[in-house]
Amino acid sequence: MQRYFVEPDLFSENEITIVGDDVHHIVNVMRAKEGDEIYVSDGEGRSARAALVVLSPKEVKARVLELLEERPELPIHITIGQGLPKGEKMEWILQKGTELGAYSFLPFSSERTIVKLDAKKEAKKLERWRKIVKEAAEQSHRAVLPQLLPPSSFREVLKTAGEYTRCAIAYEKEGTTTLHQVFDELNAEDTLLVLIGPEGGFSPDEVALAEANGFLPISLGSRILRTETASQYVLACASYQFERMNDTDE
Amino acid sequence: MQRYFVEPDLFSENEITIVGDDVHHIVNVMRAKEGDEIYVSDGEGRSARAALVVLSPKEVKARVLELLEERPELPIHITIGQGLPKGEKMEWILQKGTELGAYSFLPFSSERTIVKLDAKKEAKKLERWRKIVKEAAEQSHRAVLPQLLPPSSFREVLKTAGEYTRCAIAYEKEGTTTLHQVFDELNAEDTLLVLIGPEGGFSPDEVALAEANGFLPISLGSRILRTETASQYVLACASYQFERMNDTDE
């Protein structure tokens, strides 16, 4: 069944209103009829199964049949700080990261970033990227819509360290912390920021600066991962570590 | 430093001979000179740092400087049985799976497979796919070159169950086993076959047939993953489970 996200103020316990592009999707792409069922989430954790009651070109209304008791969200909130990669890799990172449970994405430029985004390009990219995140969240049945923050610089990102329970930077060196050590110290609802470099990785100076700002250098397994694979590794391991609890509940 | 794979009989403890496409890469792409250093693996676990001593258009010879004590391989050997996906997704699955430590790949057609490969297409695809695996293995510094088996059918794949320590099929249903339960029963050198469906997944009949052949239905976390993401989830979790031992050794 198709899933849609609506703004929280359009989601009540009885009725849900859908506006914007999703109306076109429901009416013209899915060719839905009155009575057809859909899943709807408010992007903040509430989800429902609902039946279509009004289909107009501007607006669709659905009656809530059942509020869903789903647990599709990772117990810890992981923000993927991603050094802007070349080509279309960022789209892949956003799509896969959303499927794998990322809480938010924070793209940044650093010393070895090759891509340059001017203001106009950036606005266009952000719009496209937000659409990719939304579609991936719908397809993977997320209850929370991951936030995509506007591109920032490495130094600006370091300044946000205080907003997270723990901050880490993917960098292979002597005495690197492992993901196990990071995860073992986190509890449900904690927030983790993980910085992943662009294709060329981080410079030693950048890593030193991050460490001075409280970031832990972490290693991601025994092989060398490409920039577009690293975030998926982190998120899959977080699911493995933190969703075990869910398993034994059942 | 660049890494190359050679056949085991071209790899001795003193000298390594490189033939084929890699000669072109070393001589013309990298424009390497005598004395330049490279990494070479025999694809079966031996790796060395070596210095180029002979550069000819047909053959490159390198003197072994040091045999490497690397542990880039997952302790358990995972075969990704992948239902053939549409478009270029298989290329992505092979590239990422190789980075993340897959031991071998076994593509297959099943009930909901859309792609049809005739003999000619299949030979061409296999050649391209093998090249992608080799390049990814070089880039991610693997010591073992993952094997790519020729495309098979779902029923043929089920018949190979006896060749593995454990077999699993990715399928969400009541009472599904978790990856933790599968991994907890495996030890180093054990072999695991994981079947992942094409875009439409498996039919209930296929899952029943797999179960009758000893395959465990397993769930892959709390979200719905696309076919091209599932193998990466399995491999990252295996790294998280089995490479912890490596961490504490050091």
Image (cartoon, coloured by chain):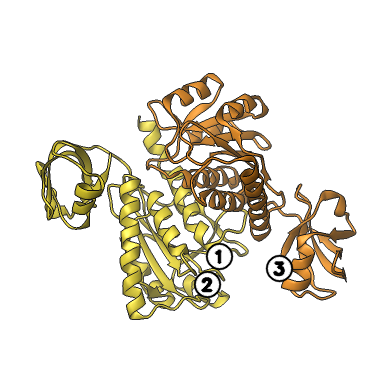
Chain colours: A orange, B yellow
Query: Can you tell which of label 2 and label 3 is closer to the viewer?
Result: 3
Give the secondary structure at mark 3. loop
Tell which of B204 and B16 is nearer to you. B16
Question: Is residue A132 rendered to the left or right of residue B80?
Answer: right
Give the chain of mark 2: B
Give the chain of mark 1: B
Disc 1 versus disc 2: distance between alpha carbons? 8 Å
Q: Which residue is mark 3?
A: A1
The reply to whether label 2 and label 3 mark residues of one chain is: no
Tell me what residue is drawn at x 86 percent, y 59 percent. A16
- Residue A63 horizontal/vertical position (percent): 88, 64
Question: Is residue B89 rendered to the left or right of residue B11?
Answer: right
User: Residue flagged by tag 3: what amino acid is it?
Assistant: Met
Is there a contact, CB below 8 Å, between mark 1 and mark 2? yes
In this rendering, is residue A219 above or below B170? above
- Residue A175 horizontal/vertical position (percent): 40, 25
Q: Quadrant of residue B2?
A: top left
User: Residue flagged by tag 1: what amino acid is it?
Assistant: Tyr
User: Residue flagged by tag 2: what amino acid is it?
Assistant: Val
Report the quarter where the N terminus of chain B lies.
Answer: top left
The reply to whether label 1 and label 2 mark residues of one chain is: yes
* Residue B149 visible in rendering: no
Disc 2 versus disc 3: distance between alpha carbons? 21 Å
In this rendering, is residue B132 above or below A36? above
Tell which of A92 and A126 is nearer to you. A126
Q: Which mark is residue B207?
A: 2
Q: Which residue is mark 1?
A: B171
Query: Can you tell which of label 1 and label 3 is closer to the viewer?
Result: 3
Disc 1 versus disc 3: distance between alpha carbons? 17 Å
